[in-house]
Amino acid sequence: MRRRAILMALAVALAVTISVTQAPPVAHASDFEVSGTFTYTVDPQSNQVHVSVDIEAKNNDVRHWVCYGGFSMAVPFTATNIVSNERTWPHNRIRTARPRVSTWPDHPGFLLADVGFRLCAGWGSIRSITITYDLGGRPPRGDGTIRMNSAYFGFQAFTFGEPGRATLKVVAPSNYVVDTLDDQWQKASTNGITTYTRAAIPEPDKFAVFVAAHDDTALERSEVATADHNAFTVQSWPGDVQWQQFVTAQIQQGVPELQTLVGVPWPIDTAVAVRESATPYVYGYAGWFSATKHEIEIGENLDQEVVLHEMSHAWFNRNWFSDRWLNEGFAQVYSNLAVGKLGGTAHTPIEIATNDPGRVTLNDWSDPDFTDGAGDRERFGYNASFWVVQQIVDEIGVDKMQTVLKAVADGTPAYLGPDTAERTDAPTGWERFLDLVERVGGSKTATTLFQDQVVTAADRSLFDQRATAQSAYTALTTHGAEWAPPAVVRTQMGDWKFTYAAASINASEACLVLRDQLGAAVQEIGTTYTSELRSAYESASGPLDAVTAKIQVQLDLATVMLKAARADRSSHGILGSVGLLGNDIDATLNEARDAFARGDLATAEQRSRKVIDAVDGETSAGLLRVGIAVALVAAATVLMRRRRRVTASTNDDGDAELEANVDVQFDGATAAAPVAAAPTLDPE
């Protein structure tokens, strides 16, 4: 929405001046009632509005007659055919006259019609007079705001009279949409005619309303497309070819330039209606954009910056930014950048004055109050938002701002994790924009600007919390190295929930301490831990207890494996070496390492404990094996001696010595030893 300085005529300026001639004694004002019905009828055939002012006067004073000598009534300066119709008394005849019309220097948009008559009323009598005139429009870009053509009727309707005794009616064909009448008006339709009625107006002398009635089917349409096939329908008032050609040129040249500057393609995939209308002027604006209807209404003036400002709202609207000042500030900056690129005269913002009567923090600059469109607050808000955004764009440059705006368009979090596809669907508020413009755009001045011009006093305390949390976040990021901060931390930082973020950062640091211990252990063991731990840590969107437990389980197992590895590397001694004969400790330990690396913790533990058990029992096993060996040697020695004795006693016949194998059992070990068989002797 583009702001411009347009002031509605004050309703108080429309009050009538009445001269009263009375015969003494004078009746009290409370004894004399004056009521009026003011009817404005839209006539598309003649492109005029026919106005009828019906005045009734009733004397409630039982003692006195009251006579009027005439009155002066304000009428718009385009009024013609002003006629008064007085019902005379006592003959009850209609007397027609043409009031004398004069200019009104204090209010150049109005004329004074002097209605002269003599209207007398006794007690209980009602006298009436009707004034009619035709209200015509001015051509596009002509004087005033009254416009009348078959597509659009815009005019002021007003009343005067005593409190509660004035009624205003607006009558129009039912195919005309009336935008500017609120829900206090009663609406009734009959035979294709709709009547809007506002009765019992509390302060008639101060009441005025701008009526904007339009029939869009009567607009002259022209289909327009850019080089990138972005579609528009330019809808101009009948006969206003100049406006149609001007807007078409701005679309075809300006939209591609805006697209280049913003760095994001035109975001609307349906045809955008660009409509000529004077309605925005009524509220003090040059135009407005509807993001939901994909419609733009622009005033009749041929203003390049206004057209491009409204076009830029295709990007800068509530789909991107939730704060009004961001949307208007960016629209101001980028429309003027485009104007400059196209060779026009760009506007620049005025530095914000601390004593500006309309000064307000930009977060307090809410949606416009259409009953006060020309106020200091609106003027200040547009300029201040323009100035703040311009400072940031000037600091980081258009290229960096393109990166920021792309992050806004894509919903990229300011605290992005390892998954670059992370997205948020929420529009960007001032907090996220500040994070993006600093973390992505590299701004060093934005925080100070926001503290001075944007945030309310209640929000300023957040900046100290933010600074503390950001320092802790930076330390966590450094400590984590290749492990990005958990999702819960990044979300809380992005949501400006710094108290929660501090607790989550502490829990994350505790996880990293365990990770570091685990890393040192597996490095000594000669293996690695699974990537599942890092994934669980980075993706944690809530409390980190489960992640901590997972790391602790692997750290506990790594401690067991470390014991096995250290045992394998230790000196086993003679008995230990003998005890380990037949056990491939290195192979078993390698199996444990491989199992741990692939996440098979059960196998890793089983193999590790096998190594530990083997090493722990190596001395006993060595003693056992040495004992067996000694026993075998001793047994062999005994048998050899016996063999020699048997051999010595062998007969001279040379009988062969018989040998047999016998089993020798020693302390649970069995060995085969040659034993000399007893000789076979012949009986004597």
Image: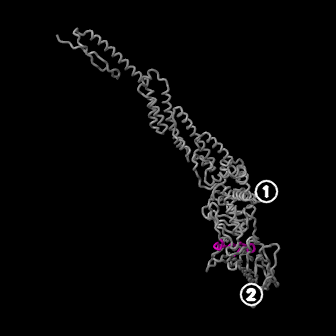
Residue type, label 1? Asn
- The residue lying at 27 percent from left, 16 percent from top is 659
> Observer-nearest residue: 21 or 332?
332
Residue 207 in view of the camera: no
Element marked by disc 2 = strand
Q: Callout 1 environment at 10 Å: few (<14), some (14 to 19), or many (20+)?
A: few
Q: Is residue 581 magenta?
A: no
Locate the N terminus and report the quarter of the image it occupies: bottom right
Numbered circle sitting on residue 585: none
- Horizontal side, residue 543 vs residue 224: left or right: left
Residue 446 point in image, percent of width and height: 71, 50
Q: Quadrant of residue 158?
A: bottom right
Residue type, label 2? Arg
Residue 399 point in image, percent of width and height: 68, 51
Q: Is residue 211 magenta?
A: yes
Q: Label 1 to label 2, Cα distance in Å?
A: 59 Å
Q: Quadrant of residue 80?
A: bottom right
Q: Which residue is mark 2?
A: 87
Locate the C terminus and report the quarter of the image it occupies: top left
Residue 175 in view of the camera: yes
Q: Callout 2 environment at 10 Å: few (<14), some (14 to 19), or many (20+)?
A: some
Element marked by disc 1 = loop
Q: Which residue is mark 1?
A: 355
- Horizontal side, residue 202 vs residue 512: left or right: right
Q: Quadrant of residue 356?
A: bottom right
Magenta segment boundaries in residue numbering: 200-220
> Observer-nearest residue: 516 or 162?
516
